[in-house]
Image (cartoon, helix red, strand yellow):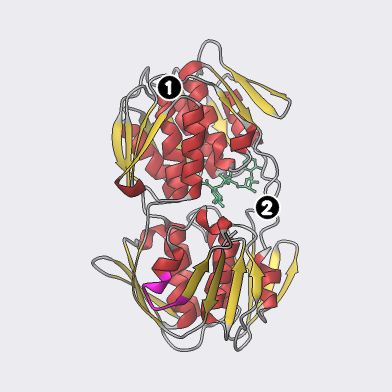
Amino acid sequence: MDTIFVTGNGPLIGQIPIAGAKNACLTLMPATLLSDEPLTLTNAPRLSDIRTMTALLTSLGAEVSSLQDGKVLALSSHAIGNHTADYDIVRKMRASILVLGPMLARDGHAIVSLPGGCAIGARPVDLHLRAMEALGAEMELRDGYVHAKAPGGLKGGIVEFPFVSVGATENILMAATLAKGTTVIKRAAREPEIVDLAHCLRKMGAQIEGEGTDTITVQGVDKLRGATHPVVTDRIELGTYMLAPAICGGEVELLGGRRDLVGAFCDKLDEAGVDVQETDNGLMVKRRSDHIKAVDVATEPYPGFPTDLQAQMMALLCTADGVSVLEEKIFENRFMHAPELTRMGAQIDVQGGTATVTGVKKLKGAPVMATDLRASVSLILAGLAAEGATKVSRVYHLDRGYEHVVGKLKGVGANIERVSDQ
Ligand code: UD1
């Protein structure tokens, strides 16, 4: 298990390139199961979650080649050779459930392990299963696996989600492309990753309307073809690195950054006293003074403030002037970074889904432990602004979602090293 050492050393200056979105790539990759022709994804991020999805798709009989140092993924699924997504892979990554819709749509059957517990809450998959049932699938839960069948093929129908789910929207959107007739998805997620998936599916021949709104209509087709598609920019990686100059001072340009991907987040940065300017190459971020103002944040589905940036925003607010209230409305247990930030001198009071952060003058370096992907990067951000050295252990969480985090931060002048334990 590797460890990252960060020492706060003042303003950061320079450029950070932003990769393709992990969460978009994880839903685009299973789309290969919908067609017997090749799917090529460019601008893919180099991450362990992508390797996990590669292993899962390979276990189902797909071929996945990683080209150009992992930036291009060539996928092909001439036939699905195995229709069982095994627990050993699915338990590592919840997004594995996204193979269910495509397999069911293409061949009328699929067996997928239930993902099991997760560090940030119960995270069931009931919405995915109910949505497949609305398209005529029969579901049975046996021995920890979902056994799904649609003997005559899926049939278009109305899917009305009780609340927004990104993954369930993606799963049913893929399934509906090959269902017979029209599917209407109501209370659909509107995240940029859904829009990106719809664009790719359309290139493959799918008939989709309304992506990016809360109602998506899909006219099923008999067959999808191959396509080449660039993965959309990672708005969470973007937001994370936008916080680095906000926390440490300096001026950093995020290459490939787009304001429309992080609108609600930019509004909160502005309220806190951080400027975001669009440039020819992306976004330039700089704080307006040495002081960050306290702001209240509530996480919401897109276009609201993303839950995946809540931990990082908390790291910023730990040293703000005044009291900030952060409300986590998507996941019930997503404040595990709070006790770790407290070890660094932060003042945080967590009550259920609300964290009250009272700004302190300075954080102090300390040994801390990464508990999940976004929590771990929030500790690194806090470490960049702290006095003395912060030792972040269990950084394998980081590798799931951030490529070259050490190199990218070093590139703008951060004092950060990764040490392998051997
Ligand atoms: C995706 C993202 C994740 C992000 C989350 C919310 C990927 C790979 N992951 O996760 O980074 O934090 O969106 O923006 O894209 N729920 C149910 N039943 C279900 C499905 C979800 O109760 O069947 C609940 C979840 O527990 C959660 C809420 O719905 O409380 C939203 O989850 P969802 O949008 O589905 O998140 P994911 O797609 O898993």
From the image, which quarter does the N terminus lie in? bottom right
Q: Quadrant of residue 406?
A: bottom left
Q: Is residue 200 above or below residue 286?
A: above
Q: Residue furthest right?
A: 351
Q: Is residue 297 left or right of residue 73?
A: right
* Neighbours of disc 2 within 10 Å: few (<14), some (14-19), many (20+): few
Classify residue 390 as left or right of residue 199: right
Say which quarter of the image contains residue 162: top right
Q: Nearer the viewer, residue 196 or 28?
A: 28
Q: Residue furthest front?
A: 422
Q: Nearer the viewer, residue 183 or 320?
A: 320
**Secondary element type, mark 2:** loop
Can residue 368 be spotted in the picture?
Answer: yes
Q: Which residues are magenta?
A: 409-415
Q: Identify the residue at horizontal 62%, vertical 63% (top origin).
A: 370
Estimate the x, y position of residue 209 in percent, counting from the top left. 38, 35
- Image: 344 above or below 81: below
- CB of mark 2 near ligand 1 (< 8 Å): no
Residue at point 41%, 38% (across, down): 28
Label 2: which residue? 119
Q: Which labelled disc corresponds to residue 178?
A: 1
Q: Which comes sooner in the sequence, label 1 or label 2?
A: 2
